[in-house]
Amino acid sequence: MRLDHVVYFTKKVPEQIVAEQQKLGRHAVVGGHHEKWGTQNALLYTRNAYVEWLSVERMDIAKQAGHPLTDLLLYDLKAGEGWGAICISVKDIESFNGEIKNKGFRTSGVFNAQRKTPDGQLRKWKMLFAEQPELNKLPLPFFIQWEEAEEVRFAKLRKDGVILPANEKHEITECIFNVDDSLNEISKWANLLSQKISASGNIVLPNVVLKFIKNKGGKERLSDVVIEP
């Protein structure tokens, strides 16, 4: 179980995000289109995970998609851009679905997903969401299992120029969440992820630390992503 990516909700088109990141000296790329969900993205890879900027491409499709992340995107963009959620990769998503259902979590069930890259390639994966009826509450992480093994997928991304050597000098080290009740929230997440709570009150995954801090107003959300160096 590892952090796969973090999602930032934006009103900008992917090309604009790529241009902005280039000015900052970072190599981001246009990800592609989620045709069934009416969304599009830009991506910035690091050594251990990646940042996804997600925006609406076809509002008519997005409103009818019934996709949990798209619904959250539409809800949050009413108040402006910002961090949305995190995605965690698991090795056997079908078994994991059964495990969390046995813990009392209602889920979307596992479903197939894909996006089309600018050069016409299809990237395929499986997804899983723990259901949350209240969109103003902190979104639980969602889960992914890629069609290809990580080493194969990353080798292709390097070959395609999506990941350059400069990308792998950076890594995402912390995801910080603003919450109303940190004890309750971290307990819920620890139960969902089958993880222990560290002595410092965090959840430590193999490639990232998840921190929960007192909310100072507004929605409960992912508030900051620390990328080092």
Image (tube, rainbow, N blue to C red):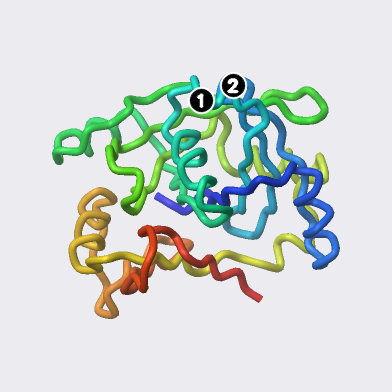
* Quarter holding residue 15: top right
Return the residue at label 1.
63
Return the residue at label 2.
60
- Provide residue 107's location: percent of width, then percent of height: 28, 31
| Residue located at (36% from left, 59% from top) | 220
| Residue located at (45% from left, 28% from top) | 67
Image height of 45 relative to 155, above or below: below
Observer-nearest residue: 20 or 148? 20
Q: Residue furthest front?
A: 78
Observer-nearest residue: 20 or 205? 20
- Count the numbered circles shown: 2
Q: Is residue 33 left or right of residue 211?
A: right
Observer-nearest residue: 20 or 89? 20
Q: Are marks 1 and 2 in contact (CB under 8 Å)?
A: yes
**Kind of residue at disc 2:** Asp
| Residue located at (81% from left, 40% from top) | 160
Image height of 44 relative to 33, above or below: below
Secondary structure under tag 1 reads helix
Q: Is residue 130 left or right of residue 224?
A: left
Location of the C terminus by quadrant is bottom right
Q: Is residue 47 left or right of residue 96?
A: right
- Provide residue 57's location: percent of width, then percent of height: 67, 31
